[in-house]
Structures are given as structure tokens and as C-alpha cells.
Amino acid sequence: MDRPTLRHDWRLPEIEALYDLPLLELVFQAQAVHRQFHDPRAIQRCTLLSIKTGGCAEDCSYCPQSAHHDVRIDREALIDVTEVVAAARRAKDSGSTRFCMGAAWRNPQRGEAFERVLSMVREVTGLGLEACMTLGMLSEEQAFALKDAGLTAYNHNLDTSRAFYDRIITTRTYDDRLETIQHLHKAGIDVCCGGIVGMGETRQDRCSLLQTLAAFEPHPESVPVNLLVPIEGTPLQDAPPLDPFELVRTVAVARLLMPASRVRLSAGRAGLSRETQALCFLAGANSIFFGERLLTAANPDVDADEALLRDLGLYSA
Ligand code: SAM
Ligand code: DTB
Ligand code: SF4
């Protein structure tokens, strides 16, 4: 079978037809494409660190860090570079290859804070790790400065479809998000961009998000697929749980649309069975967050993840 060419012109009905395939047929097709582009046993491990926690000006309905919601979390100002270096060393020792730093900002302010962020990037890459940041919206100038400091990738999610977006966030627009992604493309920083499933969106919304992501040229280097972690105090605290097979379908369609990208099984793994995670890997997921904490929410224990990867015969890459 010839390797499919990378397409950026997927039409919504084509995507929906894939999404609606019998589940095992869909997973089979996704795995076949996965094998043409990736080592099917290799899983990337990324470790997350929250470098500035809580008190965020945006009103994202899923997020415990928004100042608009009444969630009990410990707010923390921008942490010191030494703390970041210590966490990055531990991440490297535990087998992670990428270190992802997240800040609860609408956008980074110029001045000392941004300079500190740049030195975090230099220190992390100096340890031989890939450095990824997620700091909210960036100006073109900030994107170039991060590139100069050696940043590998920048995470900036679209989260959901354009049609569903204003049901989830009102303090910024879809086009604001797309503008930051353009700045990243210009600066030559790899784009990590994906979304969240389980927020009450429809299948069509999930397909539309994937259509937008696949239209990026180039495709995002990585596509995080987050399953909503419902947090008490957020507007989505009582969102009905998504059928895990919908997550598997989303992973599979992401793999078929963006064959060369990394598809990251991101937030929400702590609530998934080993078997569902195995199906996600079969459907083409080839990256996870590794370590007991995401930004503020729990992630599976390191021992449980080591055992899962070992039992499935997967190794880190
Ligand atoms: N403030 C920056 C921004 O939003 O771009 C970066 C940090 S923000 C926490 C990073 C991503 O985490 C969000 O885009 C969202 O996709 C994900 N996220 C936040 N809370 C979540 C939750 N409760 N469940 C699943 N994903 C979540
Ligand atoms: C992404 O898509 N998921 C990660 C990372 N990018 C920054 C964050 C998940 C956050 C889950 C909720 C929390 O830990 O607060
Ligand atoms: Fe702020 Fe990011 Fe949370 Fe939205 S997702 S409230 S921008 S930290």
C-alpha cells in the first residue's frame, strides 16, 4: 500500500464518513496508516509543569485556573528558573524527552516575566530535552524571541469547533487563536494544537475541529486530544461523561487526517481503563503526558503507566 499524501483539503462529509465507520474498521484503517509513518511500538513521554498557576483572566468553562470560576486551587506566581530546572532534570531521569511548561495567562506580559520564560527555555534545552511552552496568545515578536531562545514547540489549542467555541469561551475568539498559530508558523516553531472532547459538543463539532487542524500547512507537529477532566466549581463540572469509544474515534480520525503528526492522548487518562488506552494506542495515539500531575489535575501514577507500557510491549521514543 502506498503512503497516503498529506492532505489539507479534507471536506467535512468525508471526515464524518470516517468518524461514522464501524469502530473496529476505523481503528484498523488508522493503525494501517499509523504503521506507514511511525514505529507502532514507540510512545513519546512528555512531562508537564505549571510555571504560573491560577488567576487567569480568560473564562474557559473547562478550566480550573480561570479567575471567573470558584475553584479551590493554590494560585502561584511565576516560579523561579531553578525550580523549573530541578523539575526538568527529574522528568529527564524518568524517561521523558519533552518538557512542557504551562502558564495560566491570557498572554505573556513584556518585561522580566517574559525574560524569565526565555531563560527557562534555554535551561531546559540545555539539559538535552525538547522544550514546549503554553503561555496563551503571543505577538509575532514574542514568537520570534521564543524561537531564538531555542523553543521546540508551542501548545495552543483550538479546543473545539468554531461553531461551538463561544459556548465554552467568551473572552477570546477562534480567530485570536488562529492568529497566534500564524505567528508560530512565521517564527518556525513547531505547533502543538488540539482540543478537548466531552464538553457537550456533537460528533460534527469534533469532525469540524479536526478539519481545521488538518487544514494547517504544515499539519500541527502534535495534536493533543484531551478528554474533559470535570473540575468542581467550573461550569462544566457536571458535563455528562463521554462514551470512551468517541475518544477512540477522535484519535483514529486525527491519525487518518494527520498521518505524520504525533497524536497525544492527553488530559483525562486517569479516568480511562487500561483497555481504552490500549485501543487509543491502536487507533494511532503515540504520545502521552507522563508524571503524576498534569498542570493542576491528576494524571496516572508513574508506576501504573510504566506497567501499562510494559504490558502492551510499548517503549519510549
Ligand atoms: N493559558 C494557556 C492557554 O489556554 O492557551 C495555556 C494553559 S491551558 C490550561 C492549556 C490547555 O489545557 C487548554 O487549551 C485546554 O485544552 C487544556 N485543559 C484545561 N483544563 C482542562 C480540563 N479540565 N480538561 C481537559 N483539558 C483541559
Ligand atoms: C494540552 O493539550 N493538555 C495539557 C497541555 N496541553 C498544556 C494540559 C491539560 C490540563 C488539564 C487540567 C489541569 O491539569 O489543570
Ligand atoms: Fe486561562 Fe488557559 Fe485556563 Fe483558559 S485554559 S482559563 S487561558 S489557563
Image (cartoon, rainbow, N blue to C red):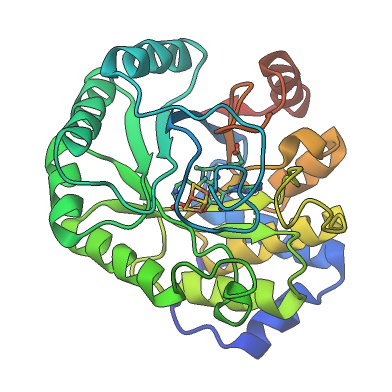
Where in the figure is residue 120, as x and y percent of width and height? 25, 26
Q: Is residue 198 above or below residue 294?
A: below
Q: In this view, does 32 lie to the left or right of 151?
A: right
Give the quadrant of residue 240: bottom right
106 w.r.t. 229: above or below? below
Give x and y (percent) for residue 218: 34, 66
Looking at this view, is 84 or 126 the one in front?
Answer: 84
- Position of residue 41 relative to residue 237, above or below, is above
Whole-percent x and y of residue 129?
A: 33, 25
Camera-nearest residue between 66 and 268: 66
Which is more toward the observer, 268 or 29? 268
**Viewport quadrant of the N terminus:** bottom right
Q: In which quarter of the image is residue 290?
A: top right
Q: Is residue 7 left or right of residue 249?
A: left
Residue occupying the point 53% across, 70% down = 170
Left or right placement of residue 78 versus residue 122 in this view: right
Please give the name of the residue rendered at 14% of the width and 39% of the height, measured from the top-left corner. 111
Q: In this view, does 87 lie to the left or right of 131?
A: right
Image position, residue 211 (x, y; %): 54, 77
For image coordinates 59% across by 54% down, the residue present is 34
